[in-house]
Amino acid sequence: MLSLIVVAMVAVAAGFVVWANDKRHAKYGIAVPAGVALAVAMLSWIIFMAAGFGYQPGLTWIPWVLPLLLGTAAAIGAVLYLGRSRTRQDTARMTAILRL
C-alpha cells in the first residue's frame, strides 16, 4: 500500500510540473493534468498489482515505475489536446464576437 501512496503523490507532482511547463496553461485548470496523471497512475497500479507484478522477483519495479510514466504521458497528452482545442475554440468565439 505504500507504493500506491508514493505513486499517487509523484503522479500529482508530475501533473503539476506538466501544467507549469505548458505555455497555454491559462486555457484550462491547474488540476486537470494532475487529475489525469493521478487517475491513470492509480488505475495502472491497480492493474499491475492485480496481475501479480508486485510480488514476482525481478518484476517488483513495474508497479513503482510504469504507473508514473503512464500517468505523466497521459497528463502530457491531455495538456496537448486541451491546450490546442481550447485555443482554437477561444479564437473562434472571439472572431464571432468581433464580427458582430
Image: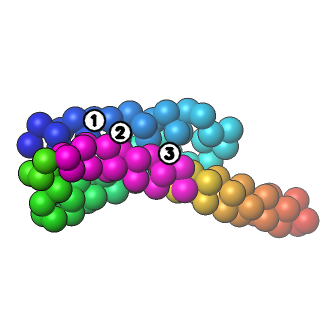
Above or below, 71 relative to 2: below
Q: Which residue is mark 2?
A: 12
What residue is drawn where x is 38% and y is 33%? Answer: 13
Residue 53 x %, y %: 17, 56
Residue bounds of the magenta highlight: 58-77
Is there a contact, CB below 8 Å, between mark 2 and mark 1?
A: yes
Q: Amino acid at mark 3?
A: Gly
Q: Residues within 10 Å of mark 2 (few under 14, many from 20)?
A: many
Give SS at disc 3. loop
Q: Which residue is mark 1?
A: 9
**Predominant SS of the magenta segment:** helix
Say whether residue 2 is visible. yes
What residue is drawn where x is 62% and y is 54%? Answer: 80
Q: How many marks?
A: 3
On screen, residue 87 versus residue 14, left or right, reads right
Q: Is residue 46 magenta?
A: no
Quadrant in the rendering for residue 7: top left
Q: Amino acid at mark 1?
A: Met
Q: Which residue is mark 3?
A: 29
How did the renderer colour the structure? rainbow
Is there a contact, CB below 8 Å, between mark 2 and mark 3?
A: no
Residue 71 x %, y %: 39, 50
Say whether residue 39 is visible. no
Give SS at disc 1. helix
